[in-house]
């Protein structure tokens, strides 16, 4: 790899679909690319699946964001004022993780036009047993804040898209300027109107000022496998 890359990661496809569509429209209109984290249980939503299957997978690629996603870990922590990491779908044991991923693969083969290579757990909470379950279920990459040990390539998360202007964004980006891969994490359901508004400027900045190339997880996998 001798260029610099950027990955847009958006979580929670299945919830707030009009906002998901709005977000994807902005990315595509500005010639960007993105990885969309689909919650497996929503594959039974025919309208959502028809929409996702209609997208060009070389530009908008789906990744597995678990199957059940029963609660939102950070909200749970806030509400219960607990300091412990809550039990989520992917900090249990191998059997449970394997069963979620198998359910995802089963539904994927029924409903989705293409199969996914990458994974991102809810709240980015996971343990080492997840890595074995991912290998077992033919996943190749995972989004993570920390480097993963094992046969799964780490797509390094850089920072959350939660700034309120392009200037704030550039300030946050400074710390990652020299990183070969910059991955921005989005939650379309939580974005404010302002944050939607300057997204085009952010894409323009990354592509034209910073000369970063937008890649999907599959493209990244090809680059790192060379
Ligand atoms: Zn999520």
Image (cartoon, rainbow, N blue to C red):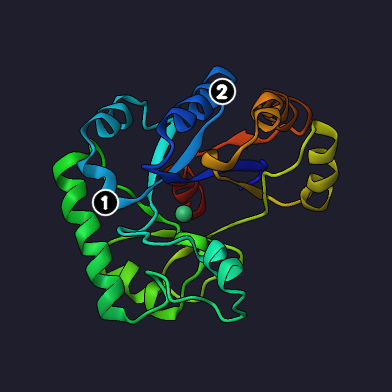
Q: What residue is drawn where x is 57% and y is 81%? A: 84
User: Which labelled disc corresponds to residue 74?
Assistant: none
Q: Which of 185 and 87 is in front in this view?
A: 87
Position above or below: 181 against 51 = below
Q: What residue is drawn where x is 51% and y is 65%? A: 73
Q: Does the residue labelled 2 lie within 8 Å of ligand 1?
A: no
Q: Where does the image place residue 106, in percent across and percent down from the top left?
A: 16, 54
Q: What residue is drawn where x is 44% and y is 79%? A: 128
Tell me the element at label 1. helix
Q: What residue is drawn where x is 40% and y is 42%? A: 15
Q: Which of marks 2 and 1 is nearer the N terminus?
A: 2
Position above or below: 186 against 146 = above
The residue singled out by tag 1 in the image is 41
CB of mark 2 within 8 Å of CB of mark 1?
no
Q: Where does the image place residue 57, in percent across and percent down from the top left?
A: 36, 32
Q: Nearer the viewer, residue 25 or 58?
A: 25
Q: Which of 216 and 128 is in front in this view?
A: 128
Disc 2 crowd, CA 10 A, few/some/many (<14, 14-19, 20+): some
Disc 1 crowd, CA 10 A, few/some/many (<14, 14-19, 20+): some
Asked which quadrant contains residue 170, the reply is top right
Position above or below: 157 against 218 = below
Residue 147 visible, this orientation: no
Residue 168 visible, this orientation: yes
Tell me the element at label 2. helix
Mark 2 vs mark 1: in front: 1
The residue singled out by tag 2 in the image is 26
């Amino acid at each position: 790899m001798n260029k610099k890359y950027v990955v847009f990661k958006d979580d929670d496809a299945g919830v707030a679909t009009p906002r998901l569509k709005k977000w994807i429209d902005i990315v595509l209109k500005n010639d960007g690319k993105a990885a969309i984290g689909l919650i497996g249980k929503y594959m039974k939503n025919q309208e959502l699946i028809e929409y996702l299957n209609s997208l060009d997978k070389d530009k908008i690629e789906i990744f597995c964001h678990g199957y059940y996603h029963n609660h939102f870990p950070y909200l749970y922590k806030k509400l219960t004022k607990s300091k412990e990491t809550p039990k989520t779908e992917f900090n249990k044991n191998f059997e449970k993780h394997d069963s979620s991923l198998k359910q995802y693969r089963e539904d994927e083969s029924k409903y989705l036009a293409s199969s996914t290579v990458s994974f991102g757990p809810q709240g980015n909470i996971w343990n080492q047993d997840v890595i074995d379950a991912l290998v077992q279920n033919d996943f190749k990459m995972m989004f993570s804040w920390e480097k993963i040990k094992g046969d799964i390539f780490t797509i390094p998360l850089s920072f959350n898209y939660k700034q309120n202007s392009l200037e704030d964004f550039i300030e946050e980006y400074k710390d990652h300027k020299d990183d070969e891969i910059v991955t921005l994490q989005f939650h379309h359901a939580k974005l404010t109107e302002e944050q939607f508004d300057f997204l085009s400027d952010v894409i323009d900045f990354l592509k034209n000022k910073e000369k970063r190339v937008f890649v999907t997880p599959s493209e990244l996998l090809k680059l790192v496998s060379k």
